[in-house]
Image (cartoon, grey):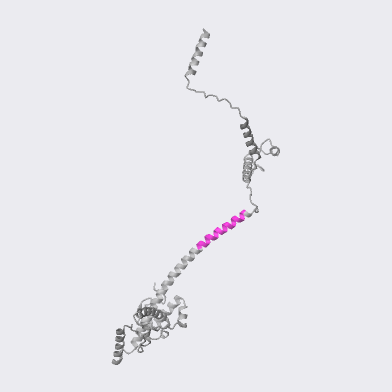
Amino acid sequence: MASAVEVGGGEDDEEEDYMSMAIAEPTKPRLKETYTQRRIRKEREAEAKGRTKSKRELEADATAAREAALATALPQDSKGFKMMAKLGFKHGNALGAFANPNARAEPLGVNVKEDRGGIGLDSEKKRKFREEAEGKVKRVKAEEGEYRERVAKEREDRRLEGLVGGAMRVAERMDTEDENGQQTKCEGAEGATAEHKSEAQDIGTGIPSRKATKPTKQINVLWRGLVRQREEKERERRMRYDLHQSLSKNAKFDDPEEDKQDRQAWGMEEEELDEDDPELDEFKALDLVEQLEKIVMYLRQRYRYCFWCKYEYPDSSMEGCPGLTEDDHD
């Protein structure tokens, strides 16, 4: 009976193995290497062993070997470790005195020097690079500061030029009014008639009328530059006018009755301006602040006029004026 049960149990096991989903991979028969394949394999192996490695490959192999050696702890069965153990060294402890808390438990890192420079060359290069970078930063800051100062100075110069020009115009106006007040108001009938005829003749001929003015060098140097600038603009305007008129007149025609001014108006003779004026050049060489101070003082002393108050005082004491400078009037 026992044998029958065992046989029945064996049949059940066989049925379970039959119903399992495990599929056995068919075994491939091992192919025998042919003579040609074996010859090719040996040639490749010999070629790989006999090939000379390049410099880059040798450096890579040396670096890998060095890193692997540094990453590996000193073997305890080595002669060096045994000598250190006899002197009291234990694995995991630091070298030297045990009471030193700052003692190193790991060896120093290796920094391989691959160039031919000295030991301190890298630090010297770093120092020079740092100084150069700091110098560039300082230079940029200095340039920014100089730019701001230059812009501020140009703005202040433009403001002072406007003030000097305004003071010149005030001085010229007041001086002209003073001269006109001192002249005789009543003119002779013959003089008025002659002037009226002269102006009418200028209008009839189409030639621009010219106002009789005194020579430029006789004008006060404080506003002589303003008059000179006005004359230069008038000269340019007349040149354009003369050019326009000369296109409508025959240049070969010569009228003996034409005077110098007529010839200049027709573009046949160039008007000359007195360019040499050392006194005016000396005044222009002064700083704008000094020019303004001279004009302001002239107005105060001659006409009791304060340029900053814009008021002409009745007496020389100028009571009520805060002071001489612009800051005093803020």
Residue 157, given in percent of the width and then of the height, sits at 44, 72
Residue 328, given in percent of the width and then of the height, sits at 41, 74
In which quarter of the view is residue 201 placed? bottom left
As drawn, 257 above or below 31: below
Residue 222, given in percent of the width and then of the height, sits at 42, 81
Image quarter (top left, top right, bottom left or bottom right) of the C terminus: bottom left
Whether residue 127 appears in magenta in the rendering, the answer is: yes
As drawn, 301 above or below 78: below
Q: Residue at x 53, y 9 (%)?
A: 3
Q: Which residues are magenta?
A: 122-141
Taking depth in this image into account, of 299 and 178 the one nearest to the observer is 178
Q: Main secondary structure of the magenta part?
A: helix
Q: Residue at x 29, y 84 (%)?
A: 204
In which quarter of the view is residue 290 placed? bottom left
Taking depth in this image into account, of 96 and 209 the one nearest to the observer is 209
Q: Is residue 136 left or right of residue 167?
A: right
Across the whole image, how many numbered discs are drawn on residues? 0
Residue 225, given in percent of the width and then of the height, sits at 42, 80
Residue 318 visible in the snapshot: no
Q: Residue at x 47, y 65 (%)?
A: 147
As drawn, 97 above or below 272: above
Residue 139 visible in the snapshot: yes
Whether residue 45 appears in magenta in the rendering, the answer is: no
